[in-house]
Amino acid sequence: MKKSVIAMAVIALAGVASAAVSSSSIAATNTTSSASSATLSGAASSGNGSALSMNSATSGATSNANAAGGAIGAGGFGIGGAAVGGSATTFGNVKSLSATSGNGVAGGVAATNANAGSAAAAGYNAGPVNGTAFGGASSQTANVAATGAGPGGGLAYVHNNAGTTSGYNATSGAVSSPWGSLTNTTSNAGSVGTVHQNAGAWGNAGYLSNGGGTSGTAGAGSTANAN
């Protein structure tokens, strides 16, 4: 009989302790990416002439996002944390060449367009602690090159290689107890674009280029509270 009473008491205490514990968290991510490329070439000659048009375009986009959060609290005690991170990267590579001799004309264009986006958010709330971490980034590379030559002898060449990478990360942490509280937050965000171009024209020829066309944005933030 005594053992049964003790067992019932333990079960009851466990139920009270379990009811006093709280935990709540959320995490969400979203990524997007798209890439396209196009080329157009034209050449014509008559009589003693020649014409050549060569164009190529390659583009790509990638993105990633990560988010996690968790917390636990009971009475005047609580601990929780959240973290997010992600990046968006795009690139475009275009080449255009036109060459003629004699009675020939040539022209062409190469173009790319790539877009990528990343977003993440995480939060927690348990007893005396709560916090959030969030961030987002976007990148775009729109690359265009065109050349033309003739009539008469001419040569024009353009090669653009461009890319953009944007990224972010953020963390949040909180600890609370009857003896004191502690919070910590961090956030970082950045965007870098690179463009490399080689171009030239000789004779009756010319070229056009947007120089690589890169852009990017990124942002991140976090909050933490302990009472």
Image (cartoon, rainbow, N blue to C red):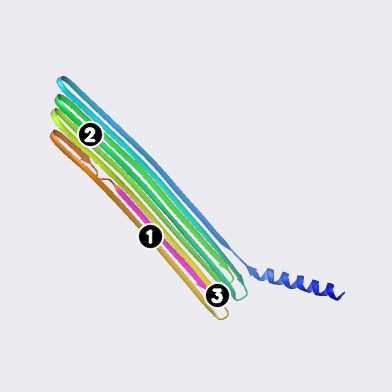
Callout 3: few (<14), some (14-19), or many (20+) C-alpha neighbours within 10 Å?
many
Label whose residue precedes the other's in the sequence (1 or 3): 3
Label whose residue precedes the other's in the sequence (2 or 1): 2
Amino acid type, mark 3: Ser
Circle 1 sits on which residue?
A: 189
In the rendered image, residue 221 lying in the magenta stretch gets the answer: yes
In the rendered image, residue 33 lying in the magenta stretch gets the answer: no
Callout 2: few (<14), some (14-19), or many (20+) C-alpha neighbours within 10 Å?
many
Callout 1: few (<14), some (14-19), or many (20+) C-alpha neighbours within 10 Å?
many
Q: Nearer the viewer, residue 214 or 94?
A: 94
Instruction: Locate residue 30 relative to residue 191 in the image: left or right.
Output: right
Q: Which residues are magenta?
A: 214-227
Horizontal and vertical percent position of residue 54:
25, 31
Instruction: Locate residue 15 relative to residue 103 in the image: left or right.
Output: right
- Secondary structure, mark 1, is strand
Give the CA distance from mark 2 to mark 3: 67 Å
Amino acid type, mark 1: Ala
Position of the N terminus, as image quadrant, is bottom right
Instruction: Locate residue 222 relative to residue 59 in the image: left or right.
Output: right
Horizontal and vertical percent position of residue 109:
26, 34
Circle 3 sits on which residue?
A: 176
Position of the C terminus, as image quadrant, is bottom right
Instruction: Locate residue 36 relative to residue 203 in the image: left or right.
Output: right
> Which residue lies at the image location 21% right of the left edge and 39% below the top edge?
208
Q: Is residue 22 above or below residue 162?
A: below
Horizontal and vertical percent position of residue 162:
30, 46
Give the CA distance from mark 1 to mark 3: 29 Å
